[in-house]
Amino acid sequence: MNIKGYYIDLEKAVKIINKNDYKNIVLQVTEGLKHIFKDFVDFFEIKTKANIFISADPCFGACDIPSFFCENTDIDLIIQIGHLPIPEFSESSIPIMFLNAFSDADVSKVVEKALPSIKGKKIGVLTTAQHIHKIDDVKNILFKNNFEPVICKGDKRIDSPGQILGCNFSAATKIVDDVDMYLFIGSGTFHPLGLLLSTKKPVISCDPYTDEVKFKELEDFKDMILRQRYGAIARSKDAKVFGIVVCSKSGQYRFNEVEKIKKLIESKNKKSYILIANFFLSSFLESFRDIDCFVSLGCPRVAIDDYMQYEKPIITPIELEIVLDVKKWDDYKFDEIIN
């Protein structure tokens, strides 16, 4: 089905629903497409006899599956629209279907526009789920212009070669010694920022929606974010009580790190409490006034995107090690959720 500039294989879901006579379906739509949820619901109601339950919670990635609700009710299938699956995703008791939203935006124009800015010979090519089907087009353009594109499959959390997540840049870090720079295809600044911080190599960002090419702007944005992170670390130096926030989302669940972090904090004669949250809100912090600093084990974007909204510092596990003098600021790395 072509809808609002994307191809989404809704018929695939219809066949599964009708074949298995599923009655109750949870439909989860990524934030960027949620405004057209009605089109998806109408399609399924016409093509199937299933009851469609629309997840109203935020959905920012394949890690956001509403498994608790579904596993404790009579839900037969979860359909998430807008992302590729996380292959290592822990199995739930009910089936999960991922229907990616493949953008029909032409990537060739913006990639050709970026060619004069490319330095070096070997270029790592990376993108998000929405443009993963266009990665061969990018590769061919680079070949024709005497560059050597390098495309790698990331770890077990990554579905396709060349794909990155906002929390996982393994497709880039695996080839960091084999490339001169990276070419990113997609919108926004968070993914290219993650590439810059995780690889410490130049990144050119090509936005096929706006035909914008960014290079120097990304470096400036990186410097601004690093200043903010340095500020968050500095504000945490005097903290005596830490809140370790574990995210209950299946795809962000890093419970295995809790004990190590708690022991580290207590080895410095400081107190820590373990908190569990499904969705991190700035208002959430107001209930825990005795906590001086929060360590987020959820999505790395929690600490970075909403930095200005928090009265108390939110830091990542890597930043905690700098706060507690286990590591130096020069050792700073972008927080990732890796396999």
Image (cartoon, helix red, strand yellow):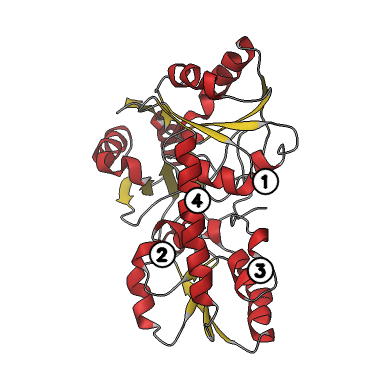
CA distance separating discs 4 and 2: 28 Å
Amino acid type, label 4: Asp
Classify residue 138 as left or right of residue 22.
right
Residue under pointer 4 = 223
Query: Looking at the image, do the residues carrying marks 4 and 2 touch, with CB atoms under 8 Å apart?
Result: no
Can residue 166 be seen from the camera position used here? Answer: yes
CA distance separating discs 1 and 4: 31 Å
Amino acid type, label 3: Asn
For the point 58% across and 24% down, the residue is 118
> Tag 1's secondary structure?
loop
Q: Which mark is residue 147?
A: none
Compared with 282, 59 (above or below) is above
- Residue 174: image quadrant is top right
For the point 46% across and 58% down, the residue is 304
Query: Looking at the image, do the residues carrying marks 1 and 4 touch, with CB atoms under 8 Å apart?
Result: no
From the viewer's side, name the closer residue of 119 and 20. Answer: 119
Amino acid type, label 1: Lys
Residue under pointer 1 = 156
Q: Which mark is residue 256?
A: 3
Residue under pointer 2 = 279
Of labels 1 and 4, earlier in sequence is 1
Classify residue 81 as left or right of residue 166.
left
Can residue 191 be seen from the camera position used here? Answer: no
